[in-house]
Amino acid sequence: MATVELKHIVKIYPNTEGSRKKKHLKGEPEKKSNLKVTEEGVLAVDDFNLSIKDQEFIVLVGPSGCGKSTTLRMVAGLEEISKGELYIDGKLVNHVAARDRDIAMVFQSYALYPHMTVRENMEYPLKIHKMPREEIDRRVNDAAEILGITRYLDRKPKALSGGQRQRVAIGRAIVRNPKVLLMDEPLSNLDAKLRNQMRAEIIKLRQKIKTTFIYVTHDQTEAMTLGDRIVIMKDGVIQQIGTPQDVYDHPVNLFVAGFIGVPQMNFYDGELIRKADGTYAVKVGDAVIDLSEEKNAHLKAHDVQGQDVTVGVRPEHITLDHSEGKMVKGTIDVAELMGASEHLHINAMGKDGIIIVPTLNLKASNFQIGDPIEFTFPGSMVHVFDKRTGLNLEDGPASN
């Protein structure tokens, strides 16, 4: 179908606060609402670089206002690219009109015509291109069959549920057989149960139609379950690109570590210790945890020195096993029984955190608010971040 390449893409919105802008010297950006403000304007997307393979499913994920939807709209041709180059199938399309890019877009709001039936909504983009009637019928019927909406073809959108409307919106996009299918938070208007169902439907759809997907969401669960690769953004800047498993296992900085994973990673002030034999351990409270061979190899390769660090560990990787020696001490604030596990909201070393304890563990039945608790974690599951930069020290210390 199509490759997509974004090279040094920048989106600048004009800065309307001229008086504030004049106070800053040329070339010296000001920080405002977490986005850079320069003499040219507000940097909504800054130096975005990404190469997308044919038929790859890419997810752009990040908090509201991080620039992910703006990036998608630039690919769609709905936003002008301020700087940089956008290629679809090797062709520069910066100044190609949206209708001529051979892409289709599914919006958060469905954007269906209320006076048209489902069939008429799906036919509309094909009629605009003056496609023969027989081909229109074939494409609409095929798309309806794939999406399981054949029985609704003669209904109006108001007679459909939210999930059914979203299927129609997707159907209207795929009848065109686009080179690239763009989806802008298509499930955010659905309740939790429907979101889960529609995620599964999108995975099935991806197997049936051979196209390139670019999907935008603020929901990291969607990103982790749908994407071949995910692109994590913050304040208009890419933080990390990788497979969901890579990003989960090896976050490059504190932001990614805290954003990916439910519940989010726990962070504690600690010390990275480099022993006389050259191996590493982390000290958190009274507990000293030796790091795994793999983590030792990464730290040694970059000659990382002992220092104060931020130690990150995921709630599911914490253990209450006392066989490991000294433990980190804390207090239980809240105990939530979740069925297969109990989520313990704790305070340890002045930091709030969560421990997930499987209910098969006999200790999981007697936790009370205010109880003291002791815990540790394996050295293979510890993440060590630079105190100053927030970068993962396994990738090496930040350059000065």
Image (spheres, rainbow, N blue to C red):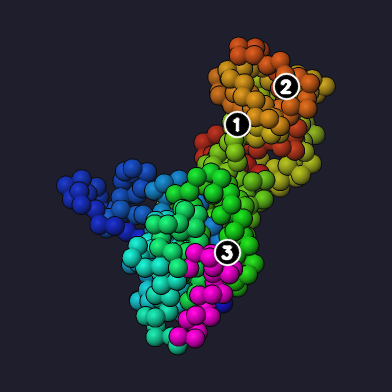
Image position, residue 129 (x, y; %): 39, 83
Q: CA distance from mark 2 to mark 1?
A: 20 Å
Q: In the rendered image of this protein, does residue 300 appear above or below residue 361? A: below
The part of the image, by quadrant, that contains residue 249 is top right
Mark 3: which amino acid?
Gly
Q: Is residue 240 magenta?
A: no
Q: Earlier in the sequence, mark 2 or mark 1?
A: 1
Question: Which mark's residue is nearer the viewer, 1 or 3?
Answer: 3
Which residue is identified by label 3? 148
Q: In the rendered image of this protein, does residue 28 appear above or below residue 340? A: below
Q: Residue at x 33, y 42 (%)?
A: 33
Mark 1: which amino acid?
Asn
| Element class at badge 2 | helix
Q: Residue at x 60, y 73 (%)?
A: 210
Viewer-closest of 213 and 111: 111
Q: In this picture, which residue range is highlighted in magenta? A: 133-153
Tell me if residue 181 can be seen. no
Q: Residue at x 54, y 49 (%)?
A: 195
Which residue is identified by label 1? 266
- On screen, residue 307 versus residue 157, left or right, reads right
Q: Earlier in the sequence, mark 1 or mark 3?
A: 3
Q: Residue at x 54, y 68 (%)?
A: 150
Image position, residue 253 (x, y; %): 56, 43
Question: Which mark's residue is nearer the viewer, 2 or 1?
Answer: 2
- On screen, residue 39 versus residue 186, left or right, reads left
Which residue is identified by label 2? 364
